[in-house]
Amino acid sequence: MRLIKTTQAINEALVQSMHQNPLLVSYGLGHNDPKRIFGTTENLVEFYGENRAYDVPTSENALTGVGVGLGIAGVGSVITHQRLDFFLLAMDQLVNSAAKWYFMFGNRSSVPVTIRLIVGKGWGQGPTHSQMLHAWFAHIPGLKVVSPSSPYTAKGLLISAIEDPNPVIFIEHRWIHDVIEDVPDEIYHLPLNKSRVLKQGEELTIVTSSYQTNQVRALYSFFDSAKVSIEHIDLISYAPLDLDTIYKSVNKTKKLVIIDDGYPVLSVASEIAFRVVEKLFSKIVKPPLCILRDNIPEPTSFNLTKSQYISNERIIFEILTYLDRNQDYTNFHSKDLNSLHDIPHPDFKGPF
């Protein structure tokens, strides 16, 4: 086994992709600084030089426009924004240029750009450094929107995104950076439109993505001990949605819970719930349950964010209530079932 962190897997995907495609460039704010964007851009400038791996001035709209222009000229690029929130200054370039180009020019020209958007959370990140806006991006026709949950999915998705001829939004949760997993050394691809079934079960389908996937994985032993047979789906892609995998699972379990680190109004979770009810109304035994954030900007305070984040305790309580089960979970000992709500584990370092 070759166990590496998510940051290493992302770096490996970039190094191998730039080696494979001599025209590919990678850039962003802090790209070549000592921390190398959490270590994800390590060695790129040393291997490929400043013409292909470079820092840029602080102008998100302009630097995204550079990627769009490069793509039109046939040069692929990976643009990294250290916080998703910073990228909001470049929405015009994304929505009115990159996403539309392939359609406006009769499918004869495209914009091969991958935009890495890192989501902040915890450590007092506050309302303007912590937003999870995947539903917003998924709403835009012409965009693919993906989000890994682990080193394996991060490397495979990023390589596929880079090779895609059209724009891909790669949403990268800061809290998965330290996740360790077995990752192949060679180049491999994961489809940008297919979910992964991580656990087979009979009683309940649970759909998650990004960091929430790791939360539920940490609770497998609890659900097993409580004799709750869950089928767990890692969504991976927000656009396009792999509804067929969800339909197949819910057709078997008859019940669905979606855990979504987004806001409740027009969320990815509500879209999935509606589609399942529409498709499988006569099959399901109760309406789907959506577990989401509160519909407020995220507070900065440690104490105020306790009620904002989706805790493991909340997941367990809401699922048991949904199933009309009364198990006592207070004695369940999990390293992730603790009061450290604003960091994923005690050794986590942040915020930047």
Image: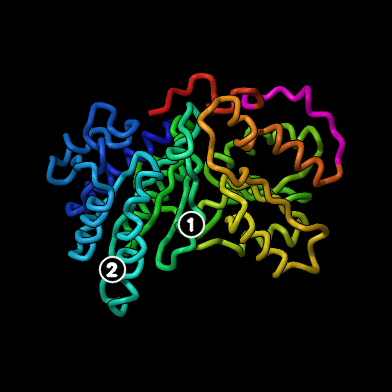
Which residue is labeled 1 in the image? Answer: 136
Q: Is residue 96 magenta?
A: no
Q: Residue at x 77, y 51 (%)?
A: 202
Distance CA(mark 1)–CA(mark 2): 22 Å
SS at mark 1 in the image? helix
Identify which amino acid the numbered label 2 is placed on: Ser
Q: Residue at x 60, y 36 (%)?
A: 309
10 Å neighbourhood of mark 1: few (<14), some, or many (≥20)? Answer: few
Quadrant of the image occupied by residue 327: top right
Q: Residue at x 44, y 33 (%)?
A: 177
- Name the side, left or right, on which 140 lies relative to 57: right
Quadrant of the image occupied by residue 331: top right
Q: Looking at the rendered structure, which numbered label has been put on residue 211? A: none
Please provide percent x and percent y for residue 134.
49, 52
Task: Tell me how the rendering is colored.
Answer: rainbow
Q: Residue at x 28, y 64 (%)?
A: 111
Front label number (1 vs 2) = 1
Please provide percent x and percent y for residue 2.
42, 32
Please provide percent x and percent y for residue 100.
34, 70
The answer to whether residue 2 shows anywhere in this view is no
Compared with residue 259, is residue 66 higher up or lower down, i.e. above or below? Answer: below
Tell me which secondary structure the magenta stretch mostly adopts: loop
Q: Nearer the viewer, residue 343 or 153?
A: 343
Which residue is labeled 2 in the image? Answer: 110
- In the rendered structure, which segment of residues is drawn in magenta? 325-336
